[in-house]
Image (cartoon, rainbow, N blue to C red):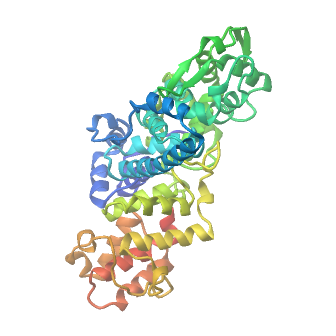
Protein backbone atom coordinates (compact mmCIF):
# COMPACT_ATOMS: atom_id res chain seq x y z
CA UNK A 1 0.00 0.00 0.00
CA UNK A 2 1.21 3.51 -0.88
CA UNK A 3 3.84 2.09 -3.22
CA UNK A 4 5.78 4.48 -5.42
CA UNK A 5 5.01 4.20 -9.14
CA UNK A 6 7.74 2.25 -10.89
CA UNK A 7 9.81 4.27 -13.41
CA UNK A 8 8.87 2.00 -16.31
CA UNK A 9 5.20 2.85 -15.74
CA UNK A 10 5.79 6.57 -16.16
CA UNK A 11 4.79 7.59 -19.68
CA UNK A 12 2.69 10.04 -21.66
CA UNK A 13 -0.56 8.52 -20.37
CA UNK A 14 0.41 8.66 -16.69
CA UNK A 15 1.82 12.18 -17.12
CA UNK A 16 -1.49 13.26 -18.66
CA UNK A 17 -3.35 11.70 -15.74
CA UNK A 18 -1.19 13.64 -13.29
CA UNK A 19 -1.75 16.99 -15.01
CA UNK A 20 -5.48 16.37 -15.48
CA UNK A 21 -5.94 15.65 -11.79
CA UNK A 22 -3.39 18.00 -10.23
CA UNK A 23 -4.38 20.70 -12.70
CA UNK A 24 -6.60 21.22 -15.70
CA UNK A 25 -4.70 19.36 -18.41
CA UNK A 26 -2.78 20.76 -21.32
CA UNK A 27 -1.64 20.40 -24.90
CA UNK A 28 0.26 17.39 -26.25
CA UNK A 29 3.44 19.47 -26.19
CA UNK A 30 2.97 20.37 -22.51
CA UNK A 31 2.22 16.76 -21.64
CA UNK A 32 5.30 15.54 -23.47
CA UNK A 33 7.47 17.98 -21.53
CA UNK A 34 6.00 16.66 -18.30
CA UNK A 35 6.64 13.11 -19.47
CA UNK A 36 10.28 13.91 -20.22
CA UNK A 37 10.81 15.24 -16.68
CA UNK A 38 10.19 11.85 -15.11
CA UNK A 39 7.84 11.18 -12.20
CA UNK A 40 9.73 12.86 -9.36
CA UNK A 41 10.54 16.08 -11.23
CA UNK A 42 7.05 16.23 -12.73
CA UNK A 43 5.45 15.98 -9.28
CA UNK A 44 7.85 18.56 -7.85
CA UNK A 45 7.15 20.90 -10.78
CA UNK A 46 3.47 20.89 -9.91
CA UNK A 47 3.74 20.86 -6.11
CA UNK A 48 6.51 23.46 -5.80
CA UNK A 49 4.59 25.96 -7.90
CA UNK A 50 6.05 28.92 -5.97
CA UNK A 51 9.19 28.48 -8.09
CA UNK A 52 7.17 29.53 -11.14
CA UNK A 53 6.85 33.33 -11.50
CA UNK A 54 3.36 34.48 -10.55
CA UNK A 55 1.86 36.81 -13.13
CA UNK A 56 -1.44 37.16 -11.24
CA UNK A 57 -2.97 40.60 -11.42
CA UNK A 58 -5.60 41.20 -8.77
CA UNK A 59 -8.85 42.77 -9.95
CA UNK A 60 -8.47 46.55 -9.82
CA UNK A 61 -11.62 46.86 -7.71
CA UNK A 62 -10.56 44.24 -5.14
CA UNK A 63 -9.40 46.54 -2.35
CA UNK A 64 -10.91 48.23 0.70
CA UNK A 65 -13.23 51.12 -0.04
CA UNK A 66 -11.62 54.30 1.37
CA UNK A 67 -14.98 56.08 1.30
CA UNK A 68 -16.81 53.33 3.23
CA UNK A 69 -17.11 55.36 6.46
CA UNK A 70 -18.49 58.39 4.66
CA UNK A 71 -21.00 56.27 2.77
CA UNK A 72 -22.23 54.64 5.96
CA UNK A 73 -22.70 58.06 7.59
CA UNK A 74 -24.63 59.31 4.57
CA UNK A 75 -26.89 56.26 4.69
CA UNK A 76 -27.74 56.85 8.35
CA UNK A 77 -28.98 60.36 7.55
CA UNK A 78 -30.71 59.51 4.28
CA UNK A 79 -34.48 59.31 3.75
CA UNK A 80 -36.15 55.88 3.44
CA UNK A 81 -36.53 56.43 -0.31
CA UNK A 82 -32.85 57.31 -0.72
CA UNK A 83 -31.81 54.30 1.37
CA UNK A 84 -33.91 52.00 -0.81
CA UNK A 85 -32.43 53.42 -4.00
CA UNK A 86 -28.90 53.19 -2.57
CA UNK A 87 -29.49 49.54 -1.69
CA UNK A 88 -30.62 48.83 -5.23
CA UNK A 89 -27.54 50.56 -6.64
CA UNK A 90 -25.31 48.56 -4.30
CA UNK A 91 -26.99 45.29 -5.31
CA UNK A 92 -26.46 46.06 -9.01
CA UNK A 93 -22.82 46.91 -8.31
CA UNK A 94 -22.29 43.69 -6.34
CA UNK A 95 -23.84 41.56 -9.09
CA UNK A 96 -21.44 43.10 -11.58
CA UNK A 97 -18.44 42.60 -9.27
CA UNK A 98 -19.37 38.97 -8.59
CA UNK A 99 -19.54 38.32 -12.34
CA UNK A 100 -16.13 39.95 -12.78
CA UNK A 101 -14.66 37.98 -9.87
CA UNK A 102 -15.91 34.67 -11.25
CA UNK A 103 -14.45 35.46 -14.64
CA UNK A 104 -11.17 36.62 -13.12
CA UNK A 105 -10.80 33.28 -11.33
CA UNK A 106 -11.72 31.31 -14.44
CA UNK A 107 -9.06 33.26 -16.34
CA UNK A 108 -6.54 32.35 -13.65
CA UNK A 109 -7.37 28.66 -13.99
CA UNK A 110 -7.29 28.79 -17.79
CA UNK A 111 -3.96 30.61 -18.15
CA UNK A 112 -1.83 29.97 -15.05
CA UNK A 113 1.39 27.99 -15.11
CA UNK A 114 0.75 27.21 -11.43
CA UNK A 115 -2.01 24.72 -12.12
CA UNK A 116 -1.98 22.97 -8.74
CA UNK A 117 -2.34 26.29 -6.93
CA UNK A 118 -5.64 26.98 -8.69
CA UNK A 119 -6.80 23.36 -8.42
CA UNK A 120 -6.23 23.47 -4.68
CA UNK A 121 -8.09 26.77 -4.45
CA UNK A 122 -11.02 25.06 -6.17
CA UNK A 123 -10.82 22.16 -3.69
CA UNK A 124 -10.75 24.47 -0.67
CA UNK A 125 -13.61 26.53 -2.08
CA UNK A 126 -15.73 23.38 -2.08
CA UNK A 127 -14.42 22.30 1.34
CA UNK A 128 -14.98 25.64 3.12
CA UNK A 129 -18.13 26.10 1.07
CA UNK A 130 -19.08 29.78 1.38
CA UNK A 131 -21.73 31.41 -0.80
CA UNK A 132 -21.82 34.98 -2.01
CA UNK A 133 -25.61 34.70 -1.97
CA UNK A 134 -25.46 35.22 1.80
CA UNK A 135 -22.16 37.08 2.12
CA UNK A 136 -23.32 39.57 -0.56
CA UNK A 137 -19.87 41.10 -0.95
CA UNK A 138 -17.54 40.32 -3.85
CA UNK A 139 -14.52 41.84 -2.10
CA UNK A 140 -14.90 39.47 0.86
CA UNK A 141 -15.21 36.51 -1.50
CA UNK A 142 -12.03 37.63 -3.26
CA UNK A 143 -10.20 37.78 0.07
CA UNK A 144 -11.30 34.25 0.88
CA UNK A 145 -10.09 33.06 -2.53
CA UNK A 146 -6.73 34.65 -1.79
CA UNK A 147 -6.48 32.62 1.44
CA UNK A 148 -7.02 29.39 -0.49
CA UNK A 149 -4.48 30.35 -3.13
CA UNK A 150 -1.87 31.56 -0.62
CA UNK A 151 -2.14 28.90 2.09
CA UNK A 152 -3.76 25.98 0.27
CA UNK A 153 -0.57 23.93 0.00
CA UNK A 154 0.92 24.92 3.35
CA UNK A 155 0.19 23.95 6.95
CA UNK A 156 -3.25 22.55 7.91
CA UNK A 157 -3.58 24.53 11.15
CA UNK A 158 -2.48 27.75 9.47
CA UNK A 159 -4.98 27.33 6.64
CA UNK A 160 -7.79 26.35 9.02
CA UNK A 161 -7.09 29.38 11.20
CA UNK A 162 -7.10 31.84 8.32
CA UNK A 163 -10.21 30.24 6.80
CA UNK A 164 -12.05 30.25 10.14
CA UNK A 165 -11.24 33.91 10.85
CA UNK A 166 -11.99 34.93 7.28
CA UNK A 167 -14.64 37.71 7.15
CA UNK A 168 -16.67 35.91 4.48
CA UNK A 169 -16.74 32.77 6.66
CA UNK A 170 -17.71 34.74 9.76
CA UNK A 171 -20.66 36.21 7.88
CA UNK A 172 -21.56 32.93 6.15
CA UNK A 173 -21.81 30.92 9.40
CA UNK A 174 -23.06 33.81 11.59
CA UNK A 175 -20.03 33.74 13.87
CA UNK A 176 -19.91 37.54 13.81
CA UNK A 177 -22.97 37.56 16.12
CA UNK A 178 -21.60 35.03 18.64
CA UNK A 179 -21.47 36.31 22.22
CA UNK A 180 -20.78 34.64 25.57
CA UNK A 181 -24.46 35.08 26.42
CA UNK A 182 -25.48 33.28 23.20
CA UNK A 183 -22.58 31.26 21.69
CA UNK A 184 -22.99 30.32 18.02
CA UNK A 185 -23.03 26.53 18.02
CA UNK A 186 -23.57 26.42 14.25
CA UNK A 187 -20.06 27.69 13.55
CA UNK A 188 -18.45 25.25 16.01
CA UNK A 189 -20.46 22.37 14.56
CA UNK A 190 -19.45 23.09 10.96
CA UNK A 191 -15.78 23.43 11.95
CA UNK A 192 -15.85 19.93 13.42
CA UNK A 193 -18.33 18.17 11.15
CA UNK A 194 -17.51 19.63 7.74
CA UNK A 195 -14.00 21.07 8.00
CA UNK A 196 -11.95 18.82 10.26
CA UNK A 197 -13.41 15.63 11.77
CA UNK A 198 -16.62 14.45 10.13
CA UNK A 199 -19.79 13.15 11.73
CA UNK A 200 -19.50 10.79 14.69
CA UNK A 201 -16.13 12.04 15.92
CA UNK A 202 -17.32 14.62 18.46
CA UNK A 203 -20.13 14.95 20.98
CA UNK A 204 -22.81 17.59 21.38
CA UNK A 205 -20.96 18.66 24.53
CA UNK A 206 -17.83 19.22 22.44
CA UNK A 207 -19.86 21.51 20.18
CA UNK A 208 -21.30 23.49 23.08
CA UNK A 209 -17.92 23.93 24.74
CA UNK A 210 -16.12 24.82 21.50
CA UNK A 211 -18.78 27.44 20.75
CA UNK A 212 -18.04 29.04 24.13
CA UNK A 213 -14.33 29.12 23.33
CA UNK A 214 -14.95 30.71 19.93
CA UNK A 215 -16.96 33.61 21.33
CA UNK A 216 -15.31 36.97 20.74
CA UNK A 217 -14.41 36.17 17.13
CA UNK A 218 -16.26 38.74 15.11
CA UNK A 219 -16.34 40.86 11.96
CA UNK A 220 -15.64 44.57 11.85
CA UNK A 221 -17.96 45.85 9.13
CA UNK A 222 -16.28 49.23 8.89
CA UNK A 223 -12.83 47.97 7.88
CA UNK A 224 -14.16 44.62 6.58
CA UNK A 225 -11.80 42.54 8.70
CA UNK A 226 -11.61 40.03 11.54
CA UNK A 227 -11.75 41.45 15.06
CA UNK A 228 -11.44 39.83 18.47
CA UNK A 229 -13.82 41.30 21.05
CA UNK A 230 -12.59 40.33 24.55
CA UNK A 231 -15.80 41.53 26.17
CA UNK A 232 -17.81 39.02 24.15
CA UNK A 233 -15.52 36.06 24.96
CA UNK A 234 -16.44 33.41 27.51
CA UNK A 235 -13.24 33.02 29.53
CA UNK A 236 -14.52 30.20 31.72
CA UNK A 237 -13.19 26.64 31.86
CA UNK A 238 -14.21 24.35 28.97
CA UNK A 239 -13.78 20.66 28.16
CA UNK A 240 -13.28 19.96 24.45
CA UNK A 241 -12.47 16.55 22.96
CA UNK A 242 -11.20 15.28 26.29
CA UNK A 243 -9.09 18.30 27.21
CA UNK A 244 -9.98 20.89 29.86
CA UNK A 245 -8.82 24.48 30.19
CA UNK A 246 -9.65 28.14 29.70
CA UNK A 247 -9.54 27.70 25.93
CA UNK A 248 -9.68 30.37 23.23
CA UNK A 249 -10.82 29.99 19.63
CA UNK A 250 -7.24 29.36 18.52
CA UNK A 251 -6.95 26.65 21.17
CA UNK A 252 -10.05 24.96 19.78
CA UNK A 253 -8.55 24.68 16.31
CA UNK A 254 -5.26 23.40 17.69
CA UNK A 255 -7.00 20.73 19.78
CA UNK A 256 -9.07 19.60 16.79
CA UNK A 257 -6.07 19.36 14.47
CA UNK A 258 -4.24 17.21 17.02
CA UNK A 259 -6.98 14.58 16.83
CA UNK A 260 -5.82 11.61 14.68
CA UNK A 261 -9.21 11.71 12.94
CA UNK A 262 -8.47 15.20 11.61
CA UNK A 263 -5.57 13.90 9.52
CA UNK A 264 -7.63 10.94 8.29
CA UNK A 265 -10.58 13.19 7.44
CA UNK A 266 -8.70 15.72 5.34
CA UNK A 267 -6.44 13.18 3.60
CA UNK A 268 -9.52 11.18 2.60
CA UNK A 269 -11.17 14.30 1.17
CA UNK A 270 -8.03 15.15 -0.78
CA UNK A 271 -7.78 11.61 -2.13
CA UNK A 272 -11.42 11.64 -3.24
CA UNK A 273 -10.94 15.01 -4.95
CA UNK A 274 -7.69 14.16 -6.74
CA UNK A 275 -7.95 10.39 -7.17
CA UNK A 276 -11.10 8.33 -6.55
CA UNK A 277 -14.05 7.70 -4.31
CA UNK A 278 -14.05 5.03 -1.59
CA UNK A 279 -10.28 4.66 -1.00
CA UNK A 280 -9.15 1.72 1.16
CA UNK A 281 -8.88 2.57 4.85
CA UNK A 282 -5.31 1.23 4.92
CA UNK A 283 -4.28 3.70 2.23
CA UNK A 284 -5.82 6.63 4.09
CA UNK A 285 -4.21 5.52 7.35
CA UNK A 286 -0.78 5.57 5.69
CA UNK A 287 -1.36 8.97 4.12
CA UNK A 288 -2.66 10.34 7.41
CA UNK A 289 0.37 9.00 9.29
CA UNK A 290 2.67 10.69 6.78
CA UNK A 291 0.67 13.91 7.12
CA UNK A 292 0.96 13.90 10.92
CA UNK A 293 4.68 13.07 10.78
CA UNK A 294 5.27 16.09 8.53
CA UNK A 295 3.72 18.44 11.09
CA UNK A 296 0.48 18.65 9.09
CA UNK A 297 2.16 20.09 6.02
CA UNK A 298 0.29 19.48 2.78
CA UNK A 299 3.22 19.35 0.36
CA UNK A 300 4.70 16.04 1.61
CA UNK A 301 1.19 14.58 1.51
CA UNK A 302 0.58 15.80 -2.04
CA UNK A 303 3.96 14.50 -3.21
CA UNK A 304 3.19 11.07 -1.82
CA UNK A 305 -0.32 11.07 -3.25
CA UNK A 306 0.77 12.07 -6.77
CA UNK A 307 3.71 9.64 -6.83
CA UNK A 308 2.08 6.51 -5.47
CA UNK A 309 1.14 3.54 -7.63
CA UNK A 310 -2.43 3.59 -6.31
CA UNK A 311 -2.97 7.03 -7.87
CA UNK A 312 -2.27 5.53 -11.30
CA UNK A 313 -4.33 2.36 -10.84
CA UNK A 314 -6.75 1.31 -13.64
CA UNK A 315 -9.75 1.95 -11.40
CA UNK A 316 -8.54 5.54 -10.85
CA UNK A 317 -7.31 6.69 -14.27
CA UNK A 318 -10.05 8.08 -16.54
CA UNK A 319 -12.70 7.07 -14.03
CA UNK A 320 -13.53 10.46 -12.52
CA UNK A 321 -16.40 12.54 -13.90
CA UNK A 322 -15.13 16.00 -14.81
CA UNK A 323 -16.64 18.72 -12.69
CA UNK A 324 -18.17 21.55 -14.76
CA UNK A 325 -15.22 23.82 -13.96
CA UNK A 326 -12.73 21.06 -14.84
CA UNK A 327 -14.68 20.40 -18.05
CA UNK A 328 -14.68 24.05 -19.12
CA UNK A 329 -11.08 24.90 -18.22
CA UNK A 330 -9.57 21.70 -19.60
CA UNK A 331 -11.50 22.23 -22.84
CA UNK A 332 -10.15 25.75 -23.20
CA UNK A 333 -6.62 24.50 -22.57
CA UNK A 334 -6.88 21.58 -25.01
CA UNK A 335 -8.49 23.77 -27.68
CA UNK A 336 -5.83 26.45 -27.09
CA UNK A 337 -8.50 29.09 -27.28
CA UNK A 338 -9.51 32.01 -25.08
CA UNK A 339 -12.30 31.72 -22.58
CA UNK A 340 -15.67 32.76 -23.98
CA UNK A 341 -17.09 36.01 -22.58
CA UNK A 342 -17.86 36.22 -18.88
CA UNK A 343 -21.64 35.92 -19.13
CA UNK A 344 -21.36 32.87 -21.40
CA UNK A 345 -18.96 31.10 -19.01
CA UNK A 346 -20.93 31.87 -15.87
CA UNK A 347 -24.25 30.88 -17.45
CA UNK A 348 -22.74 27.65 -18.78
CA UNK A 349 -21.38 26.67 -15.36
CA UNK A 350 -24.72 27.46 -13.76
CA UNK A 351 -26.49 25.21 -16.26
CA UNK A 352 -23.88 22.49 -15.76
CA UNK A 353 -24.35 22.57 -11.99
CA UNK A 354 -21.29 24.35 -10.54
CA UNK A 355 -21.74 28.05 -9.98
CA UNK A 356 -18.49 29.41 -8.57
CA UNK A 357 -18.81 31.38 -5.32
CA UNK A 358 -22.26 29.88 -4.77
CA UNK A 359 -22.00 26.23 -3.63
CA UNK A 360 -25.44 24.70 -3.02
CA UNK A 361 -25.04 24.37 0.76
CA UNK A 362 -22.49 24.20 3.58
CA UNK A 363 -21.37 20.76 2.37
CA UNK A 364 -20.33 22.07 -1.03
CA UNK A 365 -20.89 20.14 -4.25
CA UNK A 366 -21.50 16.39 -4.11
CA UNK A 367 -19.34 15.72 -7.18
CA UNK A 368 -18.97 12.34 -8.87
CA UNK A 369 -21.98 11.05 -10.76
CA UNK A 370 -24.06 13.98 -9.53
CA UNK A 371 -22.36 16.05 -12.25
CA UNK A 372 -24.01 14.06 -15.03
CA UNK A 373 -27.74 14.06 -15.59
CA UNK A 374 -29.71 13.94 -18.82
CA UNK A 375 -30.02 17.73 -18.83
CA UNK A 376 -26.44 18.48 -17.82
CA UNK A 377 -25.05 16.12 -20.48
CA UNK A 378 -27.13 17.82 -23.17
CA UNK A 379 -25.88 21.18 -21.91
CA UNK A 380 -22.29 19.91 -22.09
CA UNK A 381 -22.80 18.81 -25.69
CA UNK A 382 -24.38 22.13 -26.65
CA UNK A 383 -21.69 24.19 -24.95
CA UNK A 384 -19.00 22.01 -26.56
CA UNK A 385 -20.47 23.09 -29.89
CA UNK A 386 -20.18 26.71 -28.81
CA UNK A 387 -16.54 26.28 -27.72
CA UNK A 388 -15.50 24.49 -30.91
CA UNK A 389 -17.69 26.05 -33.58
CA UNK A 390 -18.89 29.28 -32.04
CA UNK A 391 -22.48 28.19 -32.59
CA UNK A 392 -25.17 26.44 -30.55
CA UNK A 393 -26.97 23.87 -32.73
CA UNK A 394 -30.21 24.64 -30.92
CA UNK A 395 -30.15 28.12 -32.38
CA UNK A 396 -30.73 27.07 -35.97
CA UNK A 397 -31.41 23.36 -36.06
CA UNK A 398 -28.71 22.84 -38.70
CA UNK A 399 -26.43 20.59 -36.70
CA UNK A 400 -26.65 17.79 -34.21
CA UNK A 401 -24.57 14.84 -33.12
CA UNK A 402 -25.97 11.52 -34.35
CA UNK A 403 -24.85 8.04 -35.27
CA UNK A 404 -23.46 9.30 -38.56
CA UNK A 405 -21.56 12.18 -37.00
CA UNK A 406 -22.40 15.89 -36.81
CA UNK A 407 -23.98 17.62 -39.77
CA UNK A 408 -21.88 20.27 -41.35
CA UNK A 409 -22.74 23.84 -40.47
CA UNK A 410 -20.93 27.15 -40.95
CA UNK A 411 -18.69 28.74 -38.36
CA UNK A 412 -19.97 31.63 -36.29
CA UNK A 413 -18.47 33.77 -33.56
CA UNK A 414 -15.32 32.72 -31.72
CA UNK A 415 -14.39 29.20 -32.77
CA UNK A 416 -11.34 27.01 -32.24
CA UNK A 417 -8.41 27.29 -34.66
CA UNK A 418 -8.35 23.94 -36.45
CA UNK A 419 -5.25 24.79 -38.49
CA UNK A 420 -3.32 25.55 -35.33
CA UNK A 421 -4.40 22.36 -33.58
CA UNK A 422 -3.99 20.01 -36.54
CA UNK A 423 -1.80 21.28 -39.40
CA UNK A 424 -2.18 20.11 -42.98
CA UNK A 425 0.33 17.26 -42.67
CA UNK A 426 -1.63 15.75 -39.75
CA UNK A 427 -5.02 15.88 -41.44
CA UNK A 428 -3.68 14.61 -44.80
CA UNK A 429 -4.00 11.01 -43.55
CA UNK A 430 -7.34 10.47 -41.84
CA UNK A 431 -6.15 7.63 -39.63
CA UNK A 432 -3.31 9.87 -38.46
CA UNK A 433 -5.78 12.67 -37.71
CA UNK A 434 -8.05 10.28 -35.78
CA UNK A 435 -5.10 9.23 -33.62
CA UNK A 436 -4.04 12.85 -33.08
CA UNK A 437 -7.59 13.83 -32.10
CA UNK A 438 -7.73 11.11 -29.47
CA UNK A 439 -4.26 11.91 -28.16
CA UNK A 440 -5.09 15.58 -27.66
CA UNK A 441 -8.60 15.26 -26.25
CA UNK A 442 -8.55 11.90 -24.46
CA UNK A 443 -4.88 11.03 -23.96
CA UNK A 444 -6.15 7.59 -24.82
CA UNK A 445 -8.56 5.91 -27.20
CA UNK A 446 -12.27 6.07 -27.84
CA UNK A 447 -14.38 3.00 -27.30
CA UNK A 448 -14.52 0.83 -30.44
CA UNK A 449 -18.05 1.94 -31.35
CA UNK A 450 -17.09 5.61 -31.02
CA UNK A 451 -13.87 5.09 -32.96
CA UNK A 452 -16.04 3.62 -35.72
CA UNK A 453 -18.30 6.69 -35.66
CA UNK A 454 -15.29 9.00 -35.88
CA UNK A 455 -13.76 7.04 -38.77
CA UNK A 456 -17.11 6.92 -40.59
CA UNK A 457 -17.45 10.67 -40.29
CA UNK A 458 -13.90 11.39 -41.51
CA UNK A 459 -14.17 8.95 -44.41
CA UNK A 460 -17.45 10.53 -45.50
CA UNK A 461 -15.69 13.84 -46.09
CA UNK A 462 -13.46 14.61 -49.01
CA UNK A 463 -10.27 16.54 -48.42
CA UNK A 464 -10.61 17.73 -44.86
CA UNK A 465 -10.93 21.45 -44.27
CA UNK A 466 -11.08 23.38 -40.98
CA UNK A 467 -14.81 22.91 -40.54
CA UNK A 468 -14.51 19.14 -40.99
CA UNK A 469 -11.81 18.99 -38.33
CA UNK A 470 -13.81 21.10 -35.89
CA UNK A 471 -16.84 18.87 -36.33
CA UNK A 472 -14.63 15.85 -35.60
CA UNK A 473 -13.46 17.56 -32.39
CA UNK A 474 -17.04 18.22 -31.42
CA UNK A 475 -17.90 14.59 -32.07
CA UNK A 476 -15.24 13.47 -29.58
CA UNK A 477 -16.35 16.05 -27.01
CA UNK A 478 -19.88 14.62 -27.16
CA UNK A 479 -18.84 11.08 -26.21
CA UNK A 480 -19.34 9.60 -22.72
CA UNK A 481 -15.61 8.92 -22.30
CA UNK A 482 -14.78 12.59 -22.85
CA UNK A 483 -16.75 13.44 -19.71
CA UNK A 484 -14.23 11.44 -17.67
CA UNK A 485 -10.72 12.34 -16.64
**Given the current orientation, which residue lies at the most extreme front position?**
79
Q: Position of residue 299 (x, y in %)?
A: 43, 32
Residue visible at 40% across and 86% down in the picture: 457
Please tell me which residue lies in front, 411 or 443.
411
- Rendered view: 275 above or below 182: below
Q: Is residue 485 visible to the viewer in this orientation of the structure? A: no
Residue 70 in the figure: left or right of residue 289: left
Is residue 149 shown left or right of residue 237? left
Q: How many marks?
A: 0
Kindly give the residue lying farthest to the right in the view shown. Answer: 204
Q: Residue at x 50, y 21 (%)?
A: 295
Give the position of the N terminus as an image quadrant: top right
Q: Is residue 41 above or below residue 229?
A: below
The residue lying toward the viewer, choosing from 59 and 189, is 59
Q: Is residue 378 above or below residue 90?
A: below
Q: Position of residue 129 (x, y in %)?
A: 58, 41
Residue 248 can be seen, yes or no: yes
Image coordinates for residue 65, horizontal then vertical, percent? 40, 33
Residue 267 against residue 352 in the figure, above or below: above
Extreme residue toward the left, this view: 425
Q: Is residue 237 left or right of residue 72?
A: right
The x and y percentages for residue 190 are 67, 33
Query: Which residue is located at x 46 percent, y 36 percent?
Result: 148
Q: Is residue 151 left or right of residue 264?
A: left
Amino acid sequence: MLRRLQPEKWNYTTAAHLLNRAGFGGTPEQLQRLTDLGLEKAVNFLVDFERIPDSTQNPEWAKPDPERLEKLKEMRDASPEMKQEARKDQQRLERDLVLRLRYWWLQQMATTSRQLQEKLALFWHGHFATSVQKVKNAYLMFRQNEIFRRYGSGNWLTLLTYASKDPAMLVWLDQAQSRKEHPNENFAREVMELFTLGEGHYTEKDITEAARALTGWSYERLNQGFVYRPGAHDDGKKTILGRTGNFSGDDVLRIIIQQPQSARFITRKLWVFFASENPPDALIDQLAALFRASGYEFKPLLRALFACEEFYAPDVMRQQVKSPVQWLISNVRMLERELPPAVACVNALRMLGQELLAPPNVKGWDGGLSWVTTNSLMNRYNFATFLVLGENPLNNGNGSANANGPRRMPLHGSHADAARLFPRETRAVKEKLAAALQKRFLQGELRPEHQSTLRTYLEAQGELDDVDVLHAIRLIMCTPEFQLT
